Image: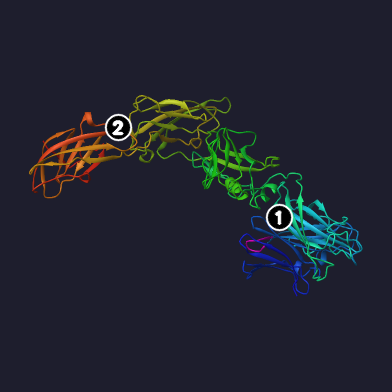
């Protein structure tokens, strides 16, 4: 015979029912929204074989995210029952993974010692509410003969408790088990005139047999309501009635937010793509998580990430996945929705302020999408990043860190060491000059050639870069420092910038003091600084053809519909097969004829540039044969940018 005593609903409409066990062992079953059984939670043998009759699974609770199921026994297991009751009774709380029903953890919950006679009196853990993964509300019910019931409501923190999962008898770890921490929130026991009329014939000043509890709505004054319900023990008379009681919890001490899973060790290659810092880190805050009907409301809270010891400008924080760009002073966006503000992202310090759209899940997603890059030129090593979360009243405590290892990529393709003059001696110092050759790679050029470019030697050894110079290049090259202090050789900003093409060779020398030469200390790279080429856009407008039979006059306009000026242009006129045309005059363009009989019009010097939104016009006269009449439309002309007459085209005098 089963004895169901607990029920908890999931967000998808399904629900769990727990039986405390009588003639049948305790169980926890999972049902869908229609009441069809869809699963059973596997209880450990020391529970199913060691429960006290009618005192097994009395309490069930699901965390707000639905991922963890808690179950509490009303009494200790038979094998855990102490011979003396002073100091309380060691009940157990079981924590299951709700996704697969597996047992994750097990803790000891000490039921209050109330100095009663166990032959006639009783006490037990009768209900739980999960506020998050580590905090619960617990309801204890005490019955004392001659006095009635006493009800106590506790806040429970399991974070510091000993995990006794798999421990058949607590006596096997006597003196080593730390129970969960309990904080009394309300004592409803033995109060005069409390719930007058319930079981009034026996205990007029006592609350009834309250065994059920659930969080209700937030009250108008901001307090959290808690709803309690009494078990009438199947009584059909007025001596015990089903009673519902609503309480309002007064705000108490604020709980500090806590991080979980913040233990990643990402690997960043300097000069490479940014890396995600931690893909499974989460933060929990008791007060913020239980707001918004359990979905969480993180308005007023903030996250700060910086290097241990203070921000370093070379640390760069960015966004991955559905997280929007982290622009200082801009909106904090996740999946396109505003969830806060990017209060700071400079000097190696990232601070994100969350608003009322930031639920518990959103905050976790944001934390898991933050990326890191390092723009420094120092030696490879490990960067320790400190995480700090502030809920608006108190900050997270302790050391919450991610360790990022930073290494350098090998030297970029095309670079080689030409010669080295090394005069370093550890006894008295010195240094070296290293000359490198760079053969320009086609893949390094954005537009076929490079006018503005830079070479970054990227020295990251123990010495100091004291100078550099370039040889074998016909134009001036400046030696400058980038934003992070690294030395670069650059033609950016020079008035004369001869083009580099694939296969060209640049010779350059780097001078280092305080260390000897080691090729592994260089990660030299070439960067084409020219803006990517923009493909010009134009629209052809062929004016109405003036045809007189055997000859015609045609005017054509070329409209610049793009975003940049067109420097040079050609249009190709597709002449239908079987028709032969001869150009007798042309204006605004030069003309040539292909072997296939098409006409190519190329801009003359005074007509070669078309500004944005402007128009160039050309025209021509031709004679023709092969058709009784001839006319041209817009589609007959094709626009080309900066196209010289291709090979195979024949000039027509």
In this picture, residue 327 sits left or right of residue 16: left
Please tell me whether residue 342 is drawn above or below residue 63 in the rendered image: above
Q: How many other residues sit within 10 Å of disc 1, few (<14), some (14-19) or many (≥20)?
A: some
Which mark is drawn over residue 216? 1
Question: In what quadrant of the picture does the N terminus appear?
Answer: bottom right
Most frequent secondary structure within the magenta stretch: loop
Residue 385 picture location, percent across and down: 62, 39
Q: What segment is highlighted magenta in the picture?
A: 96-102
Camera-side residue of 316 and 344: 344
Viewer-side label of 2, 1? 1
Quadrant of the drawing holding the C terminus? top left
Mark 2 nearby-residue class (10 Å; few <14, some 14–19, many ≥20):
some
Q: Residue 64 appears at what percent x and percent y?
A: 66, 55
Q: How is the image coloured?
A: rainbow
Which residue is rendered at x = 44% and y = 25% of the image?
479
Give the vertical position of 342 relative to 13 (above or below).
Answer: above
Number of numbered discs visible in the structure rendering? 2
Residue at position x 48%, y 35% from top? Answer: 522
Q: Nearer the viewer, residue 245 or 285?
A: 245
Q: Is residue 131 visible?
A: no
For the question of whether residue 363 can be seen, the reply is yes
Secondary element at tag 1: strand
Report the residue marked by disc 2. 611
The circle drawn on residue 609 is none
Quadrant in the rendering for residue 178: bottom right
Residue 557 horizontal side relative to residue 34, left or right: left
- Which one is nearer the viewer's eye here, 590 or 524? 590
Instruction: Decide whether residue 500 is among the magenta residues.
Output: no
Rendering coords of residue 220 (x, y %)? 70, 48
Residue 100 magenta-drawn? yes
Mark 1 or mark 2, which is nearer the start of the sequence?
1
- Quadrant assignment, res 203: bottom right
């Amino acid at each position: 015979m089963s004895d169901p005593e607990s029920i908890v609903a999931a967000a998808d409409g399904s629900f769990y029912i727990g039986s405390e066990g009588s003639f049948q062992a305790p169980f926890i079953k999972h049902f869908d929204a229609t009441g069809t059984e869809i699963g059973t939670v596997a209880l450990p043998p020391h529970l199913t074989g060691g429960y006290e009759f009618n005192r097994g699974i009395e309490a069930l609770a699901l965390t707000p995210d639905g991922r963890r199921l808690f179950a509490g026994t009303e009494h200790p297991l038979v094998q855990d029952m102490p011979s003396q009751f002073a100091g309380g009774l060691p009940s157990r709380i079981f924590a299951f993974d709700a996704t697969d029903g597996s047992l994750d953890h097990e803790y000891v919950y000490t039921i209050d010692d109330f100095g009663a006679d166990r032959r006639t009196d009783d006490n037990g853990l009768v209900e739980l509410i999960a506020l998050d993964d580590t905090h619960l509300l617990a309801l204890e019910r005490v019955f004392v003969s001659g006095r009635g019931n006493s009800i106590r409501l506790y806040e429970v923190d399991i974070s510091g408790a000993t995990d006794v999962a798999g421990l058949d008898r607590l006596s096997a770890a006597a003196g080593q088990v730390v129970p969960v921490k309990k904080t009394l929130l309300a004592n409803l026991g033995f109060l005069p005139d409390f719930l007058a009329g319930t079981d009034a014939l026996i205990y007029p000043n006592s609350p009834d047999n309250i065994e059920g509890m659930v969080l209700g709505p937030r009250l108008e004054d901001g307090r959290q309501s808690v709803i309690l319900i009494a078990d009438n023990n199947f009584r059909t008379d007025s001596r015990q009635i089903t009673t519902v009681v609503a309480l309002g919890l007064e705000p108490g001490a604020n709980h500090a937010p806590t991080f979980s899973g913040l233990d990643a060790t990402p690997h960043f290659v300097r000069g490479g793509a940014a890396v995600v810092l931690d893909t499974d880190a989460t933060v929990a805050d008791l007060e913020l998580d239980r707001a918004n009907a359990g979905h969480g409301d993180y308005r007023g809270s903030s996250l700060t990430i910086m290097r241990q010891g203070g921000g370093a400008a070379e640390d760069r924080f960015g966004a991955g996945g559905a997280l929007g760009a982290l622009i200082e002073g801009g909106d904090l966006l996740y999946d396109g929705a505003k969830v806060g503000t990017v209060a700071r992202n400079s000097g190696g310090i990232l601070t994100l302020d969350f608003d009322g759209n930031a639920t518990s899940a959103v905050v976790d997603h944001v934390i898991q999408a933050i990326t890191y890059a390092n723009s420094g030129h120092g030696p490879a090593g490990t960067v320790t990043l400190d995480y700090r979360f502030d809920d608006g009243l108190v900050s997270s405590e302790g050391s919450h860190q991610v360790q990022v290892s930073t290494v350098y990529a090998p030297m970029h393709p095309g670079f080689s060491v030409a010669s080295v003059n090394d005069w370093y001696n550890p006894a008295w110092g010195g240094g070296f000059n290293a000359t490198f050759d760079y053969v320009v790679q086609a893949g390094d050029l954005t537009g076929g050639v490079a006018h503005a470019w830079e070479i970054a030697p990227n020295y990251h050894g123990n010495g100091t870069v004291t100078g550099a110079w370039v040889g074998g290049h016909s134009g001036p090259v400046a030696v400058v420092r980038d934003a992070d202090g690294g030395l670069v050789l650059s033609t950016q900003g020079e008035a004369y910038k001869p083009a580099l093409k694939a296969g060209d060779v640049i010779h350059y020398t780097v001078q280092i003091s305080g260390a000897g030469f080691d090729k592994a200390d260089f990660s030299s790279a070439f960067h084409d600084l020219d803006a990517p080429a923009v493909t010009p856009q134009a629209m052809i407008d062929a004016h109405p053809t003036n045809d007189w039979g055997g000859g015609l006059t045609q005017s054509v306009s070329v409209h610049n519909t793009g975003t940049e000026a067109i420097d040079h242009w050609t249009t190709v006129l597709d002449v239908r097969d079987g028709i032969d045309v001869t150009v007798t005059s042309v204006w605004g363009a030069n003309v040539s004829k292909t072997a296939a009989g098409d006409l190519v019009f190329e801009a003359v010097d005074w007509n070669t540039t078309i500004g944005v939104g402007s128009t160039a016009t050309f025209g021509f006269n031709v004679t023709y044969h092969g058709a009784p009449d001839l006319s041209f439309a817009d589609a007959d002309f094709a626009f080309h940018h900066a196209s010289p007459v291709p090979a195979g085209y024949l000039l027509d005098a």
